[in-house]
Image (tube, rainbow, N blue to C red):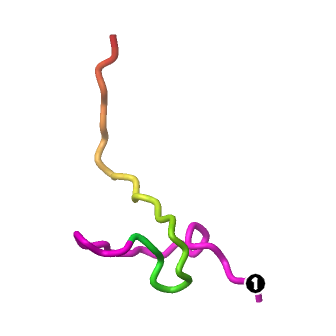
Amino acid sequence: MDPQPASQLRRGEHVEAGDVIQCRECGYRILYKKRTRRIVQYEAR
């Protein structure tokens, strides 16, 4: 079985201030921020 990068694991990671930014399972150093469920509207000119 090939190891999957953290982007494909679909697991949530809770990151505190001062923590190392990496997946705790595979060590992958890129994590993505979850999308908010709140509706966000920006004003553009």
Residue 6 in picture, x, y percent from top left:
56, 73
Residue ID at (62%, 73%):
5
Q: Say whether residue 35 is left or right of residue 40.
A: right
Figure disc tally = 1
Query: Relative to 11, is 1 above or below?
Result: below
Residue beneath disc 1: 2
Query: Relative to 33, is 28 above or below?
Result: below
Q: Quadrant of residue 44?
A: top left
Outermost left residue: 17
Give the position of the N terminus as an image quadrant: bottom right
Residue ID at (66%, 77%):
4
Q: Quadrant of residue 39?
A: top left
Label the magenta part by its dominant secondary structure: loop
Residue ID at (40%, 58%):
33
Tell which of 20 and 44 is nearer to you: 20
Residue ID at (53%, 80%):
27
Residue 36 in picture, x, y percent from top left:
34, 52
Q: Say whether residue 29 is left or right of residue 20.
A: right
Mark 1 residue type: Asp
Q: Which residues are magenta?
A: 1-20
